[in-house]
Image (cartoon, rainbow, N blue to C red):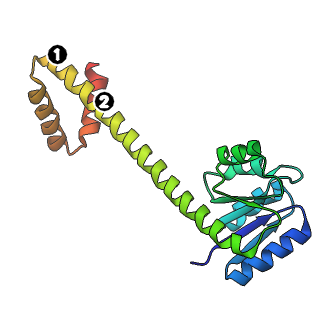
Amino acid sequence: MSFRILIADDEPLIRRDLKELIEEIGYEVVGEAKNGLEALALATRTKPDVIILDIKMPHMNGIEVARHIGEHFPLIVLTAYSKPDLVQQARDAGVMAYLTKPFRRADISPALELAVTHFVRQTKLTENVARLDTQLKARKKIEKAKGLLMKKENLSEAAAYRQIQKMSMDKNLSILKVAETIISQIG
């Protein structure tokens, strides 16, 4: 797979070397930023598949940039600093891989693959959690509506649920919509 990559580093020589290596590997560089603010603007405009960020940049460092866009793009931090606290800050900001300077060609492709793989996995997990949260909230509303019907009409749990189902079919509404209506009218 060929990735579209944005590079952000305040050192022109590093950007040039990294761009050459990335293109030699067969990937496309869609933008180069010399500071964090430029990286944010280019990320929004170019929609890259991966962003490589230097930690130490003017106007906004790479970790700050990562905090703004980490949930939208796979991020790799490129730095000469490998202190544990920087690694932890990068991880907490959504960075998926870490490259140290001086980088080698052999390090770039695996870092890109890992960043994209981790990002896709995390995105799927986030979507699953959101879906499960929505289902849980719906289930709670249905249970509340069922409880209200049980109390108001002296029904068993099964009978209350059947009544909600029947109302859903008769009015061509989802069970959740019927439950919300019951809660607003009775509750």
Q: Which residue is mark 2?
A: 140
The answer to whether one can see residue 7 in this image is: yes
Q: Relative to the observer, which residue lies in front, 141 or 181?
A: 141
- Which numbered disc, 2 or 1, marks the residue that appears first in the sequence? 2
The quarter holding residue 184 reads top left
The answer to whether one can see residue 49 in this image is: no
In the structure shown, which secondary structural element does the residue marked by tag 1 occupy? helix
The quarter holding residue 72 reads bottom right
Residue 175 image point, x, y percent: 23, 39
Dot 2, crowdedness within 10 Å: few (<14), some or many (≥20)?
some
The label on residue 151 is 1
Question: Is residue 167 toward the left or the right of residue 89 in the image?
Answer: left
Q: Is residue 181 above or below residue 76?
A: above
Q: Relative to the observer, which residue lies in front, 36 or 100?
A: 100
x 90%, y 64%: residue: 11
Question: Is residue 49 toward the left or the right of residue 168 in the image?
Answer: right
Alpha carbons under labels 2 and 1: distance apart:
16 Å
Question: Is residue 52 toward the left or the right of residue 150 in the image?
Answer: right
The quadrant of the image that shows the N terminus is: bottom right
